[in-house]
């Protein structure tokens, strides 16, 4: 019984760790896209000056 509980907790911890990695990757991509938009807008403003 204790062995099944330990295996279950280990599986849960692994699943949480993997989902956290995907979340951070997605957040990094979102931040990167936001930075690209800021760069594009600043280039447009510089061209107008």
Image (cartoon, grey):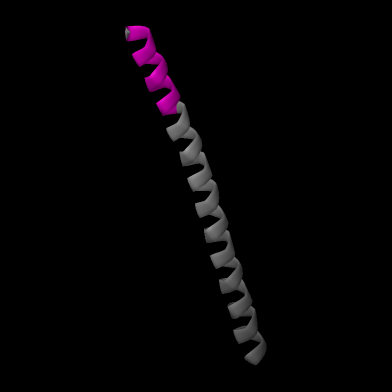
Which residue is depicted at the point 38% across and 12% down?
4
Q: Is residue 40 above or below residue 26?
A: below
Disc tally is 0
Question: Which residue is most to the bottom?
Answer: 48
The one of 17 and 49 positioned closer to us in this rendering? 17
Question: Which residue is most to the right?
Answer: 47
Q: Is residue 49 above or below residue 18?
A: below
Which residue is depicted at the point 44% across and 23% down?
11
The one of 36 and 8 positioned closer to us in this rendering? 8
Q: Quadrant of residue 34?
A: bottom right
Q: Is residue 31 above or below residue 46?
A: above
Q: Magenta-highlighted stretch: main secondary structure?
A: helix
**Magenta region: which residues?**
2-13
Asked whether residue 4 is drawn in magenta, I would say yes
Residue 19, position as x, y percentages in the image: 48, 39
Which residue is depicted at the point 32% across and 8% down?
2
The one of 8 and 38 positioned closer to us in this rendering? 8
On the rendered image, what quadrant is the N terminus found in? top left
Question: Which residue is most to the left?
Answer: 2
| 5 with respect to 49 (left or right) | left
| 23 with respect to 4 (left or right) | right
Residue 24, position as x, y percentages in the image: 49, 46
Asked whether residue 11 is drawn in magenta, I would say yes
Q: Quadrant of residue 39?
A: bottom right
The one of 15 and 27 positioned closer to us in this rendering? 15
Residue 27, position as x, y percentages in the image: 50, 53
Which residue is depicted at the point 34% across and 15% down?
5
On the rendered image, what quadrant is the C terminus found in? bottom right
């Amino acid at each position: 019984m204790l062995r099944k509980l330990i295996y279950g907790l280990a599986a849960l911890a692994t699943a949480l760790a993997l989902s956290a990695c995907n979340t951070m990757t997605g957040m990094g991509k979102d931040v990167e896209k936001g930075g690209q938009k800021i760069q594009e807008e600043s280039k447009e403003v510089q061209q107008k000056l």
